Image (cartoon, coloured by chain):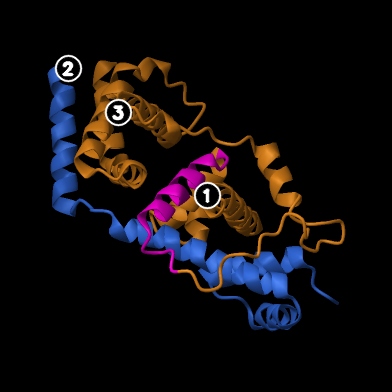
Amino acid sequence: MSNIKNQIVEEWIKLYTKELLNWCNFKINDLSQSEDLVQETFISAFENYDNFKGNSSPKTWLYKILNNKIIDFYRKNGRVELIRESMDLNDADNVANNLFDKKESWNRDSFNDTWGKSENLLDNLDFRNILALCLDDLPVNWKNAMLSKYILNRKSDEVCQELNITTSNYWQIIHRSKLLLKLCLENNWFKS
Amino acid sequence: MKMSCKEASLLVDKKISSDLSIKEWVSLKIHLSMCEMCSIYYKQSKIIDEAIKSRLKYLKYSSEVEINSLKERIKSKLNDLK
């Protein structure tokens, strides 16, 4: 039994180390710390293997462990303000829908048009950090789609297959994620 | 038939990430030429797109060799646990 466990966890190490590392590094922006956290993730997975019920994919489970490690890391470093909760899927849908009125035009009250013209935001570290936090707020599935697309550079059909969604579903998710990121940036960056 | 902003903004995000069909692109262009808000959304969404990519660009990455050595380190750590 324990031999099978070894083989499975070793297979996970082979398959998922790179993307877990990229994800962790994207979040904490510290490569050597990220390596440690990914290592700890696999050790936890190994030690708690019996708790893995197969209800979720191994990858989802590993991400969950890693995300907890990242939260612990923030706590230890007194950066609790960086701990974010994923939004509930229904809430996220509502927020995205509320950007439009009944005629499917933009809601003038919630549409912020004060940015996007000429700022040079891309070289701004704070802006990029806030954006990384905003990504964290997205519902888990949306975040996974966004990360597969941007961090892992996956093609849309690969992401669809991986997340078991249709192409039109995929574009809805990417689109709604972008709408929420717009709002999150407006609330956290452009207001301050 | 006239396209709504909801539909147009979806096409905007599709356009930023991939190719639209000619039909979709033409109808989006027409909408954008008449709709200031969607045109602004186009610019904002592009900035968000580029900002995510530029965050990635500024990160240090491990090389394949380093990733492989990390994999080996983790495996040997697990072997110590047994």
Chain letter for the blue colouring in the rendering: B
Whole-percent x and y of residue B34? 76, 81
Indicate the amino acid at tag 3.
Asn
* Residue at 78% across, 58% down: A107
| Res B81 label | 2
A71 inside magenta stretch? no
- The answer to the question of whether label 2 and label 3 lie on touching residues, with beta carbons closer than 8 A, is no
Whole-percent x and y of residue A67? 40, 32
Indicate the amino acid at tag 1.
Ser
- Tell me what hue chain A is rendered in: orange
Q: Where does label 1 land, which residue? A: A192
Q: Where does label 3 land, which residue? A: A77
Mark 3 and mark 1: Cα distance apart in space: 24 Å
Question: Circle 1 sits in a helix, a strand or a loop, which is it?
Answer: loop
Indicate the amino acid at tag 2.
Leu
Q: Is residue A136 visible?
A: yes
Where A176 sits versus B16, above or below? above
> In which chain is the residue bearing label 1?
A
In the image, the segment drawn in magenta is A120-139
